[in-house]
Image (tube, rainbow, N blue to C red):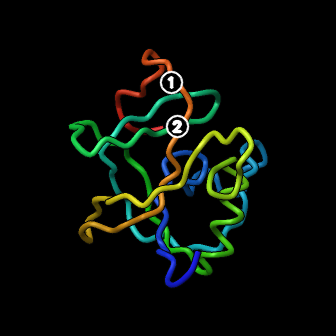
C-alpha cells in the first residue's frame, strides 16, 4: 500500500477489548488505542467459534463493535491480516478480506478497516442481536 493508510479498525469479534490477552483466542498485540463503540450496517454470523461479518450498505441490521486507532497501521494490518487469515496478505484459502467501511460512532462516521467474511454462511447462524 502506498500513501496514507487509514489508521482505524472496527473490531466485532476476538479483536474487541474483552479478548485482549486471552490465551484461548490468541488475540495478537497490534498496537492500538480504543476510540469509541460503533456500528456497521450488515450482518454477523457465528461461522465457527468465531464470528464473521457481511457488510450491507442498505441493511437495517447493525453489527456492534469497537473502533480502534492503529498506532502503526502498516505493521498492525500485517499482524491482523495474518491473525484473521485475510486478504490482502493471505492468498491461499483466506477466510476474510479487509475493506474500508463507514462506521457510525458517537463521534460521527469514521472510515475503518473491517474484516469481512468471504466464505458461505449458514443463515441459521446469524446473530440477531448484532453483538458477538
Q: Quadrant of residue 76?
A: bottom right
Identified at 56% across, 49% down, the residue is 97
Out of 77 and 27, give the one closest to the viewer.
77
Compared to residue 84, the image places residue 80 above or below, namely below
Compared to residue 108, the image places residue 96 above or below, namely above
**Furthest residue toward top:** 124
Looking at the image, residue 69 sits to the left or right of residue 76; the answer is left
* Residue 106: percent from left, percent from top: 26, 65
Compared to residue 128, the image places residue 50 above or below, namely below
Compared to residue 12, the image places residue 10 above or below, namely below
Mark 1 Cα shell of 10 Å, populated few (<14), some (14-19), many (≥20)? some
Marks 2, 1: nearer the viewer: 1
Mark 2 Cα shell of 10 Å, populated few (<14), some (14-19), many (≥20)? many
* Residue 23: percent from left, percent from top: 78, 48
Q: Which mark sits nearer the N-terminus, 2 or 1?
A: 2
Identified at 24% across, 69% down, the residue is 108
Q: Which quadrant: the N terminus?
A: bottom right
Residue 121: give its label: 1
Out of 5 and 52, give the one closest to the viewer.
5
Out of 75 and 62, give the one closest to the viewer.
75
* Residue 65: percent from left, percent from top: 42, 51
Identified at 64% across, 30% down, the residue is 49
- Disc 2 + disc 1, Cβ < 8 Å: yes
Residue 52: give its label: 2
**C-alpha gap between disc 2 and disc 1:** 8 Å
**Furthest residue toward bottom:** 3
Considering the numbered disc 1 on the image, is that residue within a helix, a strand or a loop?
A: loop
Identified at 58% across, 73% down, the residue is 32
Considering the numbered disc 2 on the image, is that residue within a helix, a strand or a loop?
A: strand
Amino acid at each position: 500500500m502506498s500513501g496514507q493508510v487509514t489508521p482505524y479498525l472496527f473490531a466485532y469479534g476476538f479483536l474487541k477489548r474483552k479478548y485482549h490477552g486471552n490465551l484461548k483466542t490468541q488475540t495478537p498485540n497490534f498496537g492500538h488505542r480504543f476510540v469509541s463503540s460503533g456500528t456497521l450496517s450488515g450482518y454477523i454470523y457465528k461461522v465457527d467459534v468465531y464470528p464473521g461479518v457481511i457488510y450491507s450498505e442498505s441493511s437495517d441490521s447493525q453489527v456492534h463493535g469497537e473502533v480502534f486507532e492503529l498506532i502503526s497501521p502498516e505493521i498492525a494490518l500485517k499482524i491482523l491480516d495474518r491473525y484473521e487469515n485475510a486478504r490482502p496478505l493471505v492468498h491461499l484459502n483466506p477466510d476474510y478480506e479487509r475493506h474500508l467501511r463507514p462506521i457510525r460512532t458517537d463521534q460521527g462516521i469514521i472510515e475503518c478497516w473491517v474484516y469481512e467474511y468471504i466464505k458461505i454462511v449458514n443463515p441459521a447462524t446469524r446473530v440477531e442481536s448484532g453483538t458477538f
